Image (spheres, rainbow, N blue to C red):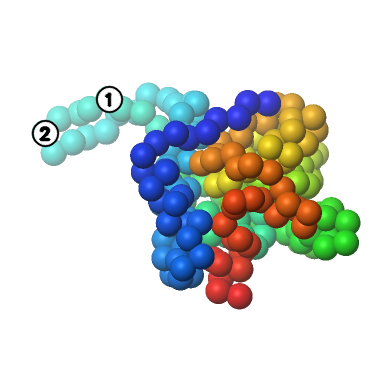
Amino acid sequence: MSTTVVDHPLVRHHLTDLRNVATASAAFRHLTRNLTSLLAFEATKELTEVRKTVQTPLCEASGFALDQRVALVPILRAGLGMVDPVLDLIPTAEVRHLGFYRNEETAQPVEYYNKLPLENPPDVALVLDPMLATGGSAIAACRTLQKWGVANLILLSILAAPEGIAAIEGEIPGLKLFVCAVDENLNEHKYIVPGLGDAGDRIFKT
């Protein structure tokens, strides 16, 4: 497994505003989009290409086109806030949904939604989850995608806790993780500190 922290002034700027408790839901959604775009730009650097020729207004020009089927897999519900900015970059991507909620007593993920088809997995899956806390939901999602047959898994998270990274390293060794920041730790309630609160609640104003 490899972990990449996207170290960039724009990431740090937007992330500071995202953490702010005074940031309203509309602004929080916009900041999430910005940070997701920056993450996706870095995370897709190794997508393969083929040569493509197009006609410009003046002449033919040689260029490139993506050569892989890409699926976006938001982990419901907070991951939904990360879908549109990646679709803006990869309009041909498929979107597949996986839903988990956290059992508040055990802090373990419970799957409640899975509509993956039985066959025809994509070449690459970008798993979208704003918060990598315990790593439970991300591990469960990646295992489900591996069983489906996806060989190339990339996880995009805005924030991660060291505990979550350690957990997923041992379970999904081939995963590529891209984050905006690695925070200090999890508190006794398994929330990331300093974190930004509950991303789903803040995205959807609930």
Quadrant that contains the N terminus: top right
Residue drawn at point x = 50 percent, y = 29 percent: 47
Q: Nearer the viewer, residue 75 or 187?
A: 187
Q: Position of residue 143 (x, y in %)?
A: 79, 40
- Near mark 2 (Cα within 10 A), the count class, few <14, some 14-19 or many ≥20, is few
Q: The residue tagged with tag 1: helix, strand or loop?
A: strand
Q: Position of residue 204 (x, y in %)?
A: 56, 70
**Residue 58, numbered label:** 2
When asked about the image quadrant of residue 2, the answer is: top right
Percent x, y of residue 142: 73, 41
| Mark 1, residue position | 62
Report the residue at 48% width, 60% height from top. Answer: 20
Q: Determine the residue positioned at 67% across, 31% down.
A: 175
On the question of residue 130 being in view, the answer is yes
User: Residue 3 occupies which quadrant of the picture?
Assistant: top right
Residue 1 marker: none
Type of amino acid under label 1: Ser
Q: Dot 2: what SS?
A: loop
